[in-house]
Amino acid sequence: MIISARVGWRDRVTGLNAGADEYIEKPFELEELIARLRSLLRRSCGKSNSILLHTDIEIDANCGLVRKAGTNVELTALEFRILNYLMYRPGRIVSQNELMDHIYSIDTMRDSNTVEVYIARLRKKLGRNTIRTVRGMGYRMG
């Protein structure tokens, strides 16, 4: 993604031809930047829309909705962020540190037990086998 103060169409074309997937001009709205970044992430994972599916779990990142077998599931903001992060990485092992880096800002006090607590809550809400623990390595979608 190119973020530039240059506003001419030739600059946009040059940037896209050079390999950029997105070109955003300054000044821009934060919401637009976030939407474009989400779009890039979906495309990089082979997703064309904001809905992710894993077995009978559906998550819509744009609306903040989670469904299990068609039934809405209420999640806290951190539970949602963890689930969304894991679902964007199907089959991949995600370490506890990687999850902590994703859910916390750099200057926040971190408790190593927090991720385990949220994973346990997600399992309770979505099913025991939804998120698997890979001993000594991290977690992955079941």
Image (cartoon, rainbow, N blue to C red):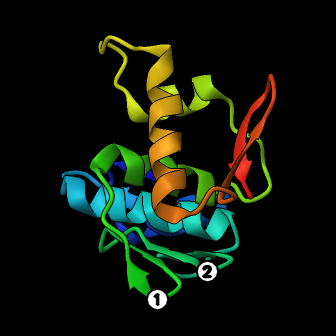
Q: Label 2 is placed on what type of residue? A: Asp
Q: Quadrant of the C terminus?
A: bottom right
- In the rendering, which numbered label is found on residue 56? 2
**Taking 48 as reference, is 124 above or below it?**
above
The residue that mark 1 highlights is 70
**Taking 102 as reference, is 66 above or below it?**
below
Q: Closer to the camera, 1 or 75?
A: 75
Find numbered disc 1 in the image and state the secondary structure of the residue it sits on. loop
Question: Which residue occupies 61% across, 80% down?
Answer: 56
Find numbered disc 2 in the image and state the secondary structure of the residue it sits on. loop
- Tell me if 120 is positioned left or right of 96 in this view: left
The answer to whether the residues at label 2 and label 1 have Cβ atoms under 8 Å apart is yes
Q: Label 1 is placed on what type of residue? A: Gly
Question: Which residue occupies 41% across, 34% down?
Answer: 103
Residue 133 percent location from the top left of the image: 73, 39
Q: Closer to the camera, 69 or 139?
A: 69
- Res. 19 image quadrant: bottom right
Question: Which residue occupies 27% across, 63% down?
Answer: 32
